[in-house]
Amino acid sequence: MAPSPSDRIDADPSLLSILSSRSSVIVAVVIAVAAFAIVGGRAWSLHFSHAQPGNDGWVLMDFRNQIYFPASAFLSGDNPYDTGVYLDKYPASRQFAPYLPSHLLMYSPLAMLPLATAEAAYAVFVACLTMGLALASCRVARFRPGTAAVAALGGLLLVTRPGQMNFLLGQQAAQMALCAYAALSLSRRSPLLAALALAVTMSKPNFGGPIAVLMLVRGDFRAVVLAGAIAGTASLLAAAGLSDAAGGVGPLLSSISANSAAWGRVFLDPASLPPLVDTVSLVSHAMGRTLTPLEQASVAVPILGLSGWALRRLAASEPGHARDALSFNLICIAAITCTYHQAYDCLLLACMAVGLVADTLWLSHRRSDPQARLRWAALFCLCVPVLNFFASHRAVECLQLSGLWLRMPAVVNGLATTALLLIVVRAAYLHSIHHAPGRVA
């Protein structure tokens, strides 16, 4: 196994001198500025340069449909889960997704602003969060480059397929990834802070749910229970207001159930969502139809079971950063593969990418690296959804893809993330063998 990454850069003077050299700093600054200029320029030319931004178009579409207008409806005393009322009274182009009611509380402050102001503020917020994600990824991976290098990494994240999609659509992947990192990193040292972070991810059930389950398997009981209590309390507070608009608790629950079912029928159809990256979507593409809830569970449960088995083996091995890093990355990739996710959610894998690259740099001068093949295979699989710009509606339209070719980009994404999960599980298994308690090296 690779040595502990905690010393990987600081212990190699040649790499440290390269990363801190003046030319490297200049290159890093140029990369960061160019990346933010490219993506920011696209957003400006496609959206913010218009006389009345926010009325139409696909840029920041998810911000309007899933954040601003639902929170506005909540503050105005309407029920955004009632699709008919929501689409009739608010200029949204899609129904509200099945988030927990706590989601409406979180974003209520933005809904108090005029739409154009809220859009601009959120775009800046997401750009800053992307930089924060770059820094957090380096900290978690114990990779310590300078400020300029972190800025360059943030720029690179922004121009990847997940980063661009998250920024231009106005999605929430950056904040969800940061909160997931906080929950996974702080669960033992500060269960309350970890619970607050995990409660944020729980507002998006397909994101926070798998992470919470695997954290329970890992033994983070206190953090998960507190997170459930926080998310539940926030959702109940929001539901109290929604129930008045819905006409009671029963009608509210019915509207939430109907909303979730309609969302699954329309927006989880693999043919309509080329950017899907998970194993459930891979199976759905293979079958040529949307999976039933039971079929989805038959895919998700084995993934969670396999990941949980690997986590338990890791828990029984000798403690250390390598074990913690494998546990961290295993939970992240399992969360991505076990249920429906689009490409922007691959921002959750930023820490894994930084760790793999840092390990490769640290070990590049070594003659023997028993994990080199696994590492290179993982890097290759990780690059597929990160760089697969063919898995987009625009690419489908421009290339006029149909039939098998229409499904191929998403199939490739699903194959890559599923293979990456298996690689991480194997790495965890090998680590548990080589670092079993009492084993003599």
Image (cartoon, grey):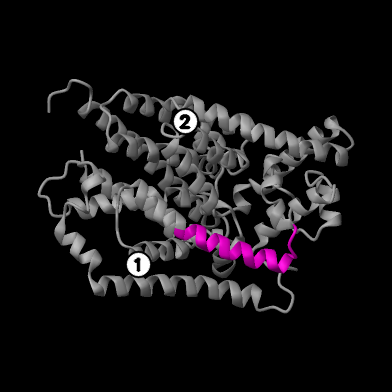
Q: Nearer the viewer, residue 87 or 116?
A: 116
Residue 124 covered by magenta stretch: yes
Amino acid type of the residue that numbered disc 1 sits on in the rendered structure: Ala
Q: Nearer the viewer, residue 271 or 378?
A: 378
Q: Secondary structure at mark 2?
A: helix
The answer to whether residue 401 of the structure is visible from this angle is: no
From the top left corner, tell me how far across and down residue 296 is, in percent: 58, 34
Q: Residue at x 30, y 34 (%)?
A: 323
Q: Main secondary structure of the magenta part?
A: helix
Name the quadrant containing residue 166. Answer: bottom right
Q: Which residue is mark 2?
A: 214
Left or right: where 441 falls relative to 48: left
Q: Nearer the viewer, residue 8 or 378?
A: 8
Q: Secondary structure at mark 1?
A: helix
Residue 31 covered by magenta stretch: no
Q: Which residue is mark 1?
A: 148
- Quadrant position of the C terminus in the picture: top left
Amino acid type of the residue that numbered disc 2 sits on in the rendered structure: Leu
Q: 394 above or below 299?
A: below
Q: Nearer the viewer, residue 141 or 195?
A: 195
